[in-house]
Amino acid sequence: MIALTLLCVAAVALLLAATATHRRWLELVSKPVASAAFIAVGFVAVGGASPLGHDYATRVLAGLVLGAAGDVALLGESKRAFLAGLVLFLLGHLAYVAAFAALVPPAAWVGGLAVAPFAVGAVVLALLWSRLGSMRAPVVAYVVVIGLMVAGALAVVSHRAGGAASLRIALGAVLFWLSDLAVARDRFVGKSFVNRAWGLPAYYGGQLVLAWSLAG
């Protein structure tokens, strides 16, 4: 797991270098490698069986695979490619929502810190609304689902349902959430290496931490 994690980190470093220097070929190579690495971490972490249960493990693995598929889709630069990536990430977030629901029933997610991701999401939507155009409906759906994912992860921590892994679950979900803010800023406000410089490490860090949560 450690070797695969280091491989992912190295691939992300190359991906950042590719983005900064506009080396498209290096981006096309390094991004799939980084994504494949976090999937591999997840499968190795599960081994024979995850201490958090079969349902949690299979749903997190599904989320990792869907996230990697979304990464590949976003290598395209068209609106269609972006929409395909959005849908795949949406499905990945739903897989994580289902995974956290296997640890804490959704009825117990209400209240407390659960309000935070939805409040931030509402502010982000308000700021971007005039820029979204025909993407408003899918972006709103995405914001709602990722809010549910973060709320579920925070519920796992507050109920300590994941034991020692609960902090990994919360950290992974929050990092993934933060990376989506970078993607939104890059897509709807203005493309900039700054968005990638913090968004990519946050994304891959989040996926890696969620993959490591499978080990307990």
Image: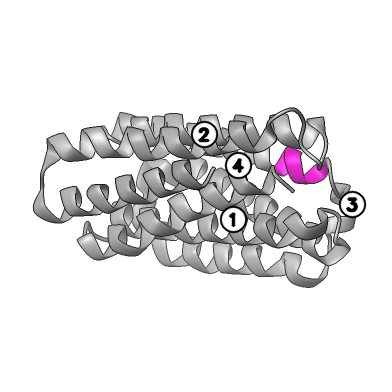
Q: Which of marks 1 and 2 is in front?
A: 2
Task: Please name the residue that numbered disc 3 is placed on.
Answer: 107
Mark 3 to mark 1: distance in Å? 22 Å
> Mark 2 sits on what residue?
39
Q: Position of residue 105 (x, y in %)?
A: 88, 47
Label 4 to label 1: alpha-carbon separation: 12 Å
Residue 196: % across, % down: 29, 57
Which residue is denoted by mark 4 in the rendering?
93
Q: What residue type is labelled 1?
A: Gly
Its colouring scheme is: one colour
Occupied quadrant, residue 195: bottom left
Circles 3 and 4 in contact, beta carbons < 8 Å: no
Give the residues drawn in magenta, as a range.
Answer: 97-101
- For the residues labelled 4 and 2, the Cα–Cα distance comes to 15 Å
Mark sitting earlier along the chain (3/4): 4
Q: Do the residues labelled 1 and 2 touch (CB within 8 Å)?
A: no
Of residues 200 and 185, the one nearer the viewer is 200
Q: What residue is rendered at 75% in x and 53% in y?
A: 152
Mark 2 / mark 3, whichever is N-terminal: 2
- Classify 10 Å Cα crowding around label 1: few (below 14), some (14-19), many (20 and above): many
Q: Name the residue under label 1.
A: 172
Residue 78 appears anywhere in the view: no
Which secondary structure lies at badge 3?
helix
On-image quarter of the N terminus: top right
Residue 134 coordinates in the image, percent (x, y): 38, 41
Displayed quadrant of residue 192: bottom left
